[in-house]
Every structure is written in structure tokens, then in C-alpha cells.
Amino acid sequence: MDMALEEARLAASRGEVPVGAVLVRQGEVLARAGNRTLELNDPTAHAEVLVIRMACEALASQRLPECDLYVTLEPCPMCAGAISFARIRRLYYGAGDEKGGAVDHGVRFYASPTCHHAPEVYSGFAEAEASQLLKDFFRSRREE
């Protein structure tokens, strides 16, 4: 999660919403990224989607069944769907997202009967730091 937090801080330094993600297989980091929606002019360039794309390319596979994803914020519906389609084994996330989250809040994507694959989900990792990064980022935006 420390690497994901580092990616979130880097995202904030680029003016992006500070969310970072790291994808790991058998202890090896396959991909790490922070949000790049503004930089790439791509609303799908969330940290989770970026690391899934990078790992799939590196492994030449559309599935990541032996992989674990660490992300600083509870995934949104789009990212929860991508995680499911990639067949990621475990999801570890930091801060919950009552407004935009789709794992333990909102639509609770993995609890849906139409969800084909649900990863094991673990929340609250470095939650205070991940949450503070977001609060500081949005506070600074309001002050501008």
C-alpha cells in the first residue's frame, strides 16, 4: 500500500485526484500508477484501469487470476467492473468512498447476482493517510 500511496501523491502533484494503485503477482509488482484522467484526456484513466492494462500487456493475457490489487480509494463502478472482468484474486483498498465507491458503498458491484467474478475484498489499509491525501487535495482546490 505504501507504493500505492506514493502513486497517489504523484497524481496529486500532477493535479490529478490522488488515487494510486499497484498490481502484484506472487510478490512481484507488475504495474503501478496514479490517476491520469486529465493528463490523458481520458475519463477511464483511473489508477486501477491503468495498472490492469499494464499488467495484461506485460502478461499477454486479459485475465489476472493470481494477482492482487492495492488501491488507495474504494473503486468506482467502472473500476469494480474492470477488476471483475480481469478476474483479479484480491482487492485491498484504503479509504472508503461513500459517494462514488461501488464495493462496500453505492451499487456494491460484487454483491450483484450478475457479477461474474468477485475478488476477495479487504478494506481499511492505510485508510487515514489515503483519506487525508484526498481531503487535502480537495481543500486546496476549493481555496484556489
Image (cartoon, grey):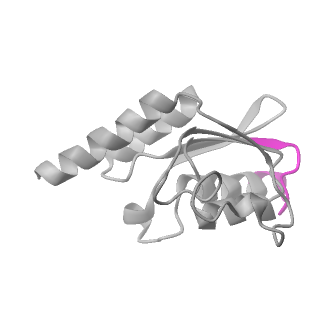
Residue 25: % across, % down: 81, 37
Q: Which residues are the magenta region? A: 58-68
Question: Is 125 drawn above or below residue 8 in the view shown?
Answer: above
Please state which of residues 91 and 105 is positioned toward the viewer in this rendering: 105
Left or right? Give the position of 30 relative to 14.
Answer: right
Please state which of residues 110 and 41 is positioned toward the viewer in this rendering: 110
| Residue 122 lies within the magenta run | no
Residue 40: % across, % down: 43, 66
Question: Is 88 drawn above or below residue 39 in the view shown?
Answer: above
Which is the main secondary structure of the residues drawn in magenta?
A: loop
Q: Quadrant of the N terminus?
A: top right
Left or right? Give the position of 109 relative to 85.
Answer: left
Q: Residue at x 54, y 68 (%)?
A: 44
Q: Quadrant of residue 31?
A: top right
Residue 37: % across, % down: 43, 63
Please state which of residues 37 and 138 is positioned toward the viewer in this rendering: 138
Please state which of residues 74 and 54 is positioned toward the viewer in this rendering: 74
Q: Residue at x 58, y 44 (%)?
A: 21
Residue 117: % across, % down: 85, 60
**Disc count in the image?**
0
Left or right? Give the position of 1 relative to 11.
Answer: right
| Residue 66 lies within the magenta run | yes
Q: Residue at x 48, y 39 (%)?
A: 7
> What residue occupies the far left of the structure in this picture?
144
